[in-house]
Image: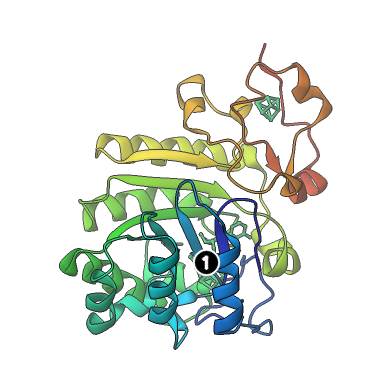
Amino acid sequence: MVVDSRAIFNLGFACNNCCIMCTYKLPEETYMVSFEEAKSMINNLGDVDGNVIMTGGEPTIRKDFFEILDYIGERHPDNDIHLSTNATTFADPDFTKRVARYPKVYVTTEFHGSTPEKHDAITRTKGSFKRTYDGIKNMLKYGVRFQIREVIHKMNYQDLPAIAKFLVKEFPELRKTVIFTIDFIGNAKRNIDAVFVKNSEIIPYVEEATKIFERNNVQVTYFQIPCCMLKKKYRYKVVPNNVSSDRIYFDKKCDACSYRNKCSGVWRTYAEKAGVGELKPIP
Ligand SMILES: C[S@@+](CC[C@H](N)C(=O)[O-])C[C@H]1O[C@@H](n2cnc3c(N)ncnc32)[C@H](O)[C@@H]1O
Ligand code: SF4
Ligand code: SF4
């Protein structure tokens, strides 16, 4: 299933975690595309100008994971393969060593909390913090490139500065991160009372975490955080157009904003719940 106009393909929904804010309805949505469907999706990407992004569910739990990597390598030999994963499978050193043989693979993964208790309460999977931690240590040991991201909602926004401190201490090799808010679909929609928080609450913690990352030479970018809610010096960190436009909302008043083309707007589902009172066009 091609879920976006970029070179992104989704191998299905099944996962070994069960995050409270996942975009899918887990644990019951377990559909996985077949190997033949995966090949046809890879063929349909056409000429890719940039990275091939492989996501799920959890791509690394598939038995044919390496065959899929081989097929991407055949069809798109010059492109980096961005693998979106919870990194738990990398806790197995043999798996990590095998991935290290694919130098085009670049992992993007997440920590949801600064302690095992906080992270596992969000993934709703006991032991997941430790497996992700061990997985990233294995990536460092065996030479798999990676980036760690923070996906922010009511259950972890106040923990964000502690997550930043934890990451720079434990993974001083980290050079880039992304902080982003959530789309209220799938599990996030049905658990909305547990995960919804207004952006105006989140942003002071985002800015504090950014300071910690930057003091430690980690470059920070933001997805789905509106420029007008940030201090001026942080606005350039917002990446526009990073998801398909039908999931994003710009209000009429955004037409008068000087940041309209630099802004990522807000999730449509966020605007439906929170309204647009927080948005203030920048002259
Ligand atoms: C659905 S996951 C699939 C890949 C992998 N299982 C993982 O968690 O990285 C893809 C990305 O979506 C993020 N994500 C999870 N729930 C989200 C939500 N409600 N809105 C936006 N992104 C979300 C994850 O943190 C991850 O970066
Ligand atoms: S966000 Fe990723 S790790 Fe978490 S349940 Fe969804 S697919 Fe699995
Ligand atoms: S007013 Fe609209 S376009 Fe301007 S910064 Fe805010 S959300 Fe972005």
Q: Is residue 88 left or right of residue 39?
A: left
In the image shown, does 281 or 83 lie closer to the viewer?
83
In the image shown, does 126 or 33 lie closer to the viewer?
33
Q: Residue at x 63, y 21 (%)?
A: 259
In this rendering, is residue 155 above or below 29?
above
Percent of width and height locating residue 54? 49, 65
User: Which residue is the site of mark 1?
Assistant: 55
Q: Residue at x 74, y 64 (%)?
A: 189
In this rendering, is residue 138 above or below 185?
below
Q: Quadrant of ligand 3?
A: top right
Q: Residue furthest bottom?
A: 63
Q: Residue at x 51, y 78 (%)?
A: 17
Mark 1 Cβ and ligand 1 under 8 Å apart: yes
Percent of width and height locating residue 107? 37, 61
Name the image quarter holding the N terminus.
Answer: bottom right
Q: Amino acid at mark 1?
A: Thr
In the image shown, does 93 or 283 lie closer to the viewer?
93
Residues packed near mark 1 inside 10 Å, few (<14), some (14 to 19) or many (20 plus): many
Q: Is residue 31 left or right of residue 214?
A: right
